[in-house]
Structures are given as structure tokens and as C-alpha cells.
Image (cartoon, grey):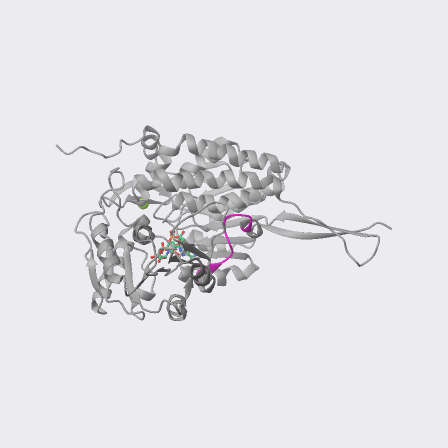
Amino acid sequence: MEKTTTVAVDSRVEVFLHDGPKKLFIGGEFVESLSGRTFDTTNPATGEVITTVYEADKEDVSRAVEAAERALKGSWSKVTASERGKLLWKLADLMEEHAEALAQLETLDNGKPIQETRHADIPLAIDHFRYYAGWATKIHGEVIDNSAGVNLFTYTRREPVGIVGQIIPWNFPLLMATWKLGAALATGNVVILKTAEQTPLSAIYLAELIQEAGFPEGVVNIITGYGPTAGAAIVQHQRIRKVAFTGSTEVGKVIMQQASSNLKRVSLELGGKSPNIIFPDADFTKAIPGALMGIFFNQGQVCCAGSRLFVHKKVFDNVLSDMTSYASKLKQGPGMDESTRIGPLVSDKQFTRVSNYLQRGVEEGASPLTGGQPLDTNGFFIPPTIFADVQDHMSIAREEIFGPVVAAMPFDDEEHITDIIRRANDSEYGLAAGVWTTDIRKAHKVAHALEAGTVWVNCYNAFDAAVPFGGYKQSGFGREMGSYALELYTQVKSIWINLD
Ligand code: NAP
Ligand code: MG
């Protein structure tokens, strides 16, 4: 009999999933939505309903804003920077205690392999809070010597923006929640965060830990609901001063327009079609697994996925043959099976979208070397797919597919990198890029010439809380992580004192 490697469901997950519809976290309490409406969240590996959550609407957003405002003017304003840091650190400790439950919930709700949630999503999320816990005590203004008058004393303060709205996607639900919350809370803001409708569970679980950590009520409000209702209500609310969004470029544009009603500050982390370039002098023992991981990690549902693979023509056939042989052996199955390397896509909608691209690729003349056909099961499974015979103008080479599908294209200039740079930059997007070469001069030259917010050389998908991440062009603006994210959540006040 084959040894089962399916994970036994953690008892905390059982309790969490079976104590009734999951509530909104507003003003430090778990509450039903005012309308009483709920919606289901499903397990993408089976298509079955996991549990039900309350559906927030405009009125619930208003209620959250009132709670946040009370906290901003009251209890939170009395919490010192050091105490804010301690709260974030305590939250990270609690997440560590609950790491297995969080990993399982994320896998059940999103579909991604438990090996990834245990070893990437959850540890990165915990580390993110620890990193920003350290920043809380290091945010300060400066004394500025001015030339306006000898007895005029000037200094600046870095103050929180105030009430902040945050809208996150479903591809890394908990990690995206922490990317948003960490910098905002370290800098003393209050938050209303909306999860993606497909993946509400890990953030609700996080809300329980936020409550346990002892954040004053109303500092963090987490709501579950739909984009055009709850999401739009956040973007349009007149007392929310900033909106931070991660998701599609299409919705990013709507958000920017709607945020103009009260000139909210906006930061947008949007889509991508990132080029990954393999030069003939690359170390292939690193480049081949790197290119595979660059596209197939998280079933390709990654904004910075290396979805346009440019391989020098001298090595194209060999690289593609090795990649194909490896990709066709990647074990695909339910995320809760420890041996699974590729899980299902997040939803029926995403499955249909990616399936359509598979069909479109073939219609446009590309050839799948492996994959190419959706699996005929109840879950939302698409096999890792590598397309060859791709032209730069094809939709599979230009549009964000957000699935395990790579468009591989040869290039042939090596010494003069102008042409490959032009092709790599010929995109509306500019989120990330990869370069594989052992020539240090070429590595830097190419890295400087690429229009992307992140360039990985001889690695891909490397992340750290200290290193900024964000887009060029239509991949958005604003930088999350590192000291850069502090800019998003603070405003500078100049103070003049007349000493005469
Ligand atoms: P999406 O619509 O951009 O969703 C992202 C978030 O925005 C969700 O919380 C969503 O709520 C919310 N939202 C949607 N419409 C809104 C509106 N009018 N006002 C305020 N908030 C709104 O992304 P999707 O439909 O889930 O995915 C579609 C495509 O977007 C994917 O195929 C992929 O290409 C891209 N995408 C990119 C990223 C990224 O990290 N760059 C992440 C996810 C998706 P709901 O959950 O209710 O929709
Ligand atoms: Mg789900």
C-alpha cells in the first residue's frame, strides 16, 4: 500500500473551521456583518466548501473606520514606539506558536502545497513582523539648521498618516496581510484591511492572534468581503487617508481614480510579465532549477513570476529539454499532501482564465513541450506548462497569465546585449527580472538596463523583509519592505520655533 503523506488536520484548525461562520474583526471584537450576509470559501483541491464567512459591505467599512478613528485619537496615541514594537514582536511569537495551524489554513484555502506554506509563507510572514518591530523605535524626524533667521529653530516629525485602508490578493494571503500591516503599525497608523474573497481564513485567524497579543481595540480591523462593495467602500471613504493595494493592474487603475475623491495617498503593487534571461555562460545547475522555480512556485500565481523566459539560442534546446523533463515529473496534487510540489490554482475562475490562455497559445502557434491541458478533476489543477515556438507579440508572451505557464523564446545576441534588453523591456509591466550569467560585467550591465523594480542575478524569487519590493511602469508604485515602506505610512511635519 502506498504510504500516505496527507497531513492530519491540526486540532486548532478543526476548532476554527467548525465554530460557525467566521466573523469580521472590528473594534477588537468579532462581529457579524450588519447585513447578516455570508459567503462560502472553498478548497481548491476539491472544489468543496471549507466554511462560511461574513460579507462586509459599505456600512461595515464605516463601522470599522469609526473604531479605527477612536483608537487613533485615543488608546493608540498613548502607546509608545517601544510598546508598538513589543506588540508586533508578541504577534510574531504567537504566529510561531500557531505556525502549523496557519500553514494548514493557508493550504486549505488557497491550495498551495503545505511544504510551501510551512517553509515560505508562514516563516516569511513571522519574520516580517519581527523586522518592523525593530523599526518602531527608529522612526524620527531631524533637527535642521536653517538660514532663515539665527533665532529660528526648525525640526521635523514623522507622523502616521492616520486611518489606512489595505486591500490584498489571494496568492499569498497571510504574507500579503503582514506586508501591509507591519510597516503601517510600526509607524503608528490604524488599519482597515480587506482580504481577497477566495482566501479570507488565515487573516481571520491572524485577527485572533492580534486580539491575544493585546493591540488596543480598533487599531487593526480585518474584514472579509467583495472588491466592488467592501473594497470600493474603503477606497472611497472620506476619512481614510491612504490606500495600499496589491492585485491586478486593471483594479489598480480603478483604485487610483476612486482614491482621488479625497486625494488619498495610493501605493499599488500590481501585475507583471517578468523576463528571465539565461545567457550561454550561465551556471546551468543553478539556472535551470532557478527558471523552473521562477515560474512554477505557487503554481505561477506570483506577481513577479518569470513568465517570459529568454534563453540564448546556443543553449535553448538543452535548457528546454532539461526543464521539460523536470517539469513533467513535478508531483501535482492536493496541497495537504506533503509530497505535492504543484497544487491546484486558487479558484474556478483562475482555472478557466489559465485554461483559456493554454488554448490561445496553441491557436497563436505556440507548442507546449509539457503540460498544455487542464486536468479533468474536481479541483482546479493545471499542469506545469512550457510553451516553445513563442513570438514576442503573442498574448501568452505579453499578458499576465498568473498560472504555471512559461513562454520560452530564444535570443541570439550575446556580446551586444541591446536587442535582448529591448525585448525584455518591451512590456507595460516592470515588476521584476532575472539574469543568469557568470560574467560579472554583463550581470551588472543587464541589471542596470532592465526596467524592473527587482532584478535577481543567478537567483530568482529571493525575498527579505529588509529589501524593498515594488514596480516600474504599470506594475505600480511605492515600495513595500525595508525602510522604504516607512515612507508610505508616515508624513513629515516641519516645525518652526521663534526663539526671540
Ligand atoms: P483583483 O480583482 O485585482 O483582486 C485583488 C483585491 O482587490 C481583492 O481583495 C479584490 O476583492 C479587490 N478588488 C477587486 N475589485 C475592487 C474594486 N473595484 N475596488 C477595491 N477593491 C477591489 O485580482 P483577481 O480578480 O483576484 O485576479 C485577477 C488577476 O489579477 C489575476 O489573474 C492576476 O493576473 C492578477 N493578480 C495579481 C496579483 C499580484 O500580486 N500582482 C495578485 C492577484 C491577482 P475580491 O477578492 O472580492 O475580488
Ligand atoms: Mg478558498
Which x, y percent locates residue 132? Answer: 53, 41
403 above or below 473?
above
| Quadrant of the image occupied by residue 147 | bottom right
Number of marks in the rendered image: 0
Which x, y percent locates residue 327? Answer: 23, 51
110 above or below 361?
above
Nearer to us in this view, 448 or 15:
448
Q: Residue furthest right?
A: 500
Q: Residue furthest top?
A: 11
Residue 449 shown left or right of residue 77 in the figure? left
Do we see residue 88 in this rendering? yes
Nearer to us in this view, 50 or 436:
436
Q: Quadrant of ligand 2?
A: top left
The magenta region covers 474-484
Do we see residue 23 in this rendering? no
At 35% across and 69% down in the image, what residue appears? 413
At 43% across and 34% down in the image, what residue appears? 95
| Quadrant of the image occupied by residue 207 | top left
The majority secondary structure of the magenta stretch comes to loop
User: Magenta includes 230?
Assistant: no
Which x, y percent locates residue 420? Answer: 37, 68
Residue 73 shown left or right of residue 33 in the figure? right
Nearer to us in this view, 200 or 460:
460
User: Magenta includes 482?
Assistant: yes
Nearer to us in this view, 72 or 471:
471
Which x, y percent locates residue 374? Answer: 20, 55
At 26% across and 48% down in the image, what residue appears? 344
In the picture, the quarter occupied by the N terminus is top left
